[in-house]
Amino acid sequence: MRLLHSIRSEEIPVCQGQYLCLIGGRRINQIELWRITRLPDGTEIVRADISREGGPDLLTHLQRGPSGRPEWLRVRYKHGSINAAAQYTFEDEVVRVARQLEGQPVRQEMMDIATGYEVDYPPVIGHDYVWRGYPDQAQGRVWAMPVFSPDLWGEEIMGGRVLRFSVKPRGAERCETPAGLFEQASHFEVVLSDGVRAFSWFDERGIPLRWLYPDKGYDFVLAAYTKHSEISYT
């Protein structure tokens, strides 16, 4: 697994794994490797390495504070002739963006966003997608929440955008993946701002097991999973 920043000696391994991607039921050559570690003060670090033959190449490094709230995300992105890097710093009501395309000056921006927002950055499904931030106060109800997402594919590379997802809990059910059978996976239905539906399943730690777009035929599944400690992410 490639790393954007090396693992420090004081980091404690928590868990790690691998996701596979299927389109129309057929596996494509895209692999995501991810690893979560924890510092003695409770800070968590989530690293991911996503690669696809002939497609985008992505390294990410997310730091979450002891409360679980994201503090900053660093991304390195390559696709064809595009070579870019960015950092997103998450404050209470704004996201500070610093991004740079190779050969161009650094662009710094600040994006206003509603208080209590979550963080989303596809295609990395092993991290903090919006339904993983489903708030306790929703108490099993459909819940719409503002989201910040780095835009990796648009004309404004890594510029970021604000959108809103609707999240509906569907209870616990069995979820079978190449990494194993999970009898009591938490299941959510998500409706994106453009009307696209998605379904997700999580284990007791809050780790995504499967991420399905039925209308698009995209299916991301957990193919390998190693637990190093009993830290919970729910």
Image (tube, rainbow, N blue to C red):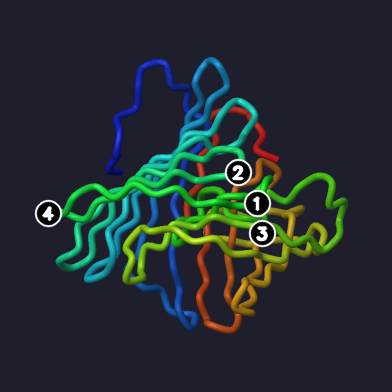
Q: Amino acid at mark 3?
A: Trp
**Of callouts 3 and 4, which one flags the residue occurring earlier in the amino acid sequence?**
4
Q: Nearer the viewer, mark 3 or mark 1?
A: 1
The answer to which quarter of the image holds residue 82 is: bottom left
Q: Residue visible at 67% across and 72% down?
A: 191
Q: Which residue is mark 2?
A: 93
Q: Amino acid at mark 1?
A: Ala
> What distance separates the C-alpha of mark 2 from that of mark 3?
29 Å
| Residue 152 location (% of width, % of height) | 37, 63
In the image, residue 155 above or below residue 97: below
Q: Of the numbered discs in the image, which one, if any, rests on residue 201?
A: 3
How far, Cα to Cα, is label 4 from label 1? 34 Å
Q: Earlier in the sequence, mark 2 or mark 3?
A: 2
Q: Type of residue at label 2?
A: Glu
Callouts 1 and 2 close, C-beta under 8 Å: yes
**Residue type at mark 4?**
Gly
Out of 182 and 118, give the one closest to the viewer: 118
Residue behind mark 1: 114
Pointer 3 with pointer 4, Cβ within 8 A: no
Q: Secondary structure at mark 1?
A: loop
Residue drawn at (43%, 42%), measured in percent from left and top?
73
Question: Which residue is under mark 4?
Answer: 103
**Distance CA(mark 3)–CA(mark 1):** 27 Å
Residue 175, image x, y percentages: 68, 61
Label 3: which secondary element: strand
The answer to whether the residues at label 4 and label 1 have Cβ atoms under 8 Å apart is no
First in residue order: circle 3 vs circle 1: 1
